[in-house]
Image (spheres, helix red, strand yellow):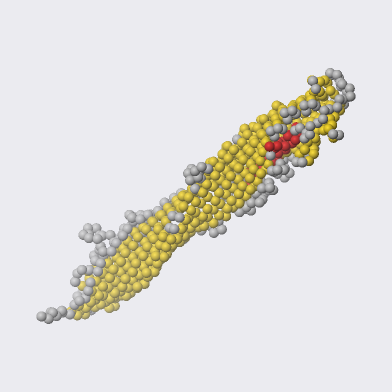
Amino acid sequence: MTPAGARLLRRGLLAGVLFVSLAVAWTLRRPATEPAPPPTPTGSPGQGTTFGELVYLRFREGKESVQVKARAMTGREGAAMRLEGVELTFPFVTRGEASRATVTADESLYDPDRQGATFRGHVHVTTEDGFVLDTESLEYRGDEEVATTPGPVRFQRRSASGTARGLEYSGTGGRLELHSEVRLRFEKAGGAPTEVESGQAVALRGGSAIDFSGGVRVRQGKSELAAERLKVELDDELEGITRAMAIEQVDVRSADAGPETPGEARGLRHLRCRRLEVFFRENGALASATAVNRASLVLEPGPGEPRERRRIEAYLLHFTFDGEGRLQSLSGRRGGPRVREKGPEVVLTTEPIPPATTGQRRVACHTFGARVAPTTGRLESAEFGGDVAFSEPGRRASAQRAQYDEARGWLTLLDRPRIVDEREGSELRAQRIELGTRAGTVAARGEVQHTLTRRAKGRSGLLSGEQPTLLRSGTLDYDERGRVARYRDGALLRAGRDEIRAAEIVIEERAPDRRRLLARGDVVSLLHPRPARGARRDPAPVEAHSEEMVFEEAEGRVVYRGEVVMRQGDLRTRSPEAVVTLGEDGGSVKTMVAGEPVELEQGRRRAKGRQGTYTPETETVVLVGDRVVLEDADRRVEGKVLIFRVGEDRIQVDGREEARTEAIFKRREAPPP
């Protein structure tokens, strides 16, 4: 319910209906005191005889009660007098103050004993406070305190006016009924007029309650309210509305900001429900409004706003307003009054309006509440509860609770939050997930679990493979603009049987299928190379320890730095840096290069050199350097290039057995007897 839509109710009802229900009642009600029997007029006119201007007065205890003037008396019907050119004036009390009303007509049948009168022809009713009513016939039965007219009625009070067909007022029941074709109009200086239409209207309890039915429509400028029924309650002074309720097929449309803010342009606001209840403050400002039973609020974009349509649907929508009648909060919930836990969900959607092609965004939950800045109408914060589900093209999120902070631009998901990105092929879970709506950032905290299922074309490995890549950590921070994800506090990456553990793991996506993985702090990696075609057994896993590790997906290369220790089977190396080059499929190991310098252990062998290269396919180790040294249990070999195969005793030095080599063979002595 927008402020303009609620103002439409207040102005249309207060200004257009109040004077009808009250002024007509005041005009036709009986005087507060019973009049004394009338004095016998001087002379008794005969049938059809006129006496110029006839004046007939009634008094009680020396005070004037009713005054009747007529141009002529044309006869009698029993005690009733038939008058022409009649004018009847009588007193009444309104809000404790004495006032007078006057009725004029072309002719009247007036019965002073029964305080009854029938008026015909140009019936005109006026009161001292400015009320005017016109009709062609009016009958008042004083003994029953009932006034009726079956024909059209026109009325006006100050800047308000209206029409209806058929009127009945009952003084004993305090009931005023306008039978059909009710039309009201209120004009205010500087503002658009307010018009009210209904099939009929009934005022109760002396005019303090008014019930419109038979199809109600209230218009002001480009704003409009429609409903099957509309009930209004007035204050004690009968000058302001305290409560209004629209019932069945309620439809409120507002396309402008209203007279109070003529310079502010807004899009169409459209509220629909089965019942709308509105409460007002003593100063006439809106206090609250509640729309129930399939409530739906649609907000169209205004000038300069994104081309998208926003919609809120719920069983109940509740609006609160500040002291000046400006919207300050909006809430909704699912279910019905008996079983609140069941029923349709609260759904908030944003859908593009062509030519925009951004795709639909949707939020579903059990309850939600939002705070709005009254001065600007902009959202400040929002809370969602109960099976909260967000969706947009290619992305879904869920949680039990969610909070939105406009100042920070953060949406926080709490209690089992989960985000699924179908485009990126990922799923994120944590104890708490925060989404930066402006910067496109993600912050996950507590038991972070991020699963990546997207595969690089034709490749396998740490970030792409038949099996998903799983990352676990204490925290995750993701920057969508830079496409950088940082996993901290005990980070773990597992892809199939491959694993990486580190204090921090960073994944950067510079371009599609060109991801870069960086691990820092006590890095431990375990890679399981694919066996070569025709191999009898799987190769041993490659285990590495280092301070830093970098994996370039496109290049298929893993670089380790800082106290690097690598092991495959019984082959172990130590070096400041090591590089593992993967095969074209991304799953096999092509070469392992460690060095500058490198220490190698393989069984009892110990070797040192500037650089060492291991090729798993041939199980060949190549050591190079100015002085390469190899020792095992019974020999020591030196050279610049040393080549051997794992598991074999044959060693090749510098390509030739004798060139620039020195071999020392130590024979083992036989053990003593």
**Quadrant the N terminus occupies:** top right
Tell me which residue sits at (79%, 34%) in the image. 33
x, y (%) of residue 302?
60, 47
Instruction: In the rendered view, tell whether residue 278 sits above or below residue 58.
Output: below
Tell me which residue sits at (48%, 46%) in the image. 341
Camera-side residue: 619 or 215?
215
**Quadrant the C terminus occupies:** bottom left
Instruction: In the rendered view, tell whether residue 601 sits above or below residue 78.
Output: below
x, y (%) of residue 349?
51, 47
Instruction: In the rendered view, tell whether residue 460 sits above or below residue 605.
Output: above
Camera-side residue: 226 or 257?
226
Instruction: In the rendered view, tell whether residue 601 sits above or below residue 583.
Output: below
Residue 613 horizontal side relative to residue 260, left or right: left
Tell me which residue sits at (62%, 50%) in the image. 321
x, y (%) of residue 68?
83, 29
Q: Can residue 192 be seen in this view?
A: no
x, y (%) of residue 158?
76, 39
**Which image quadrant is residue 316 in?**
top right
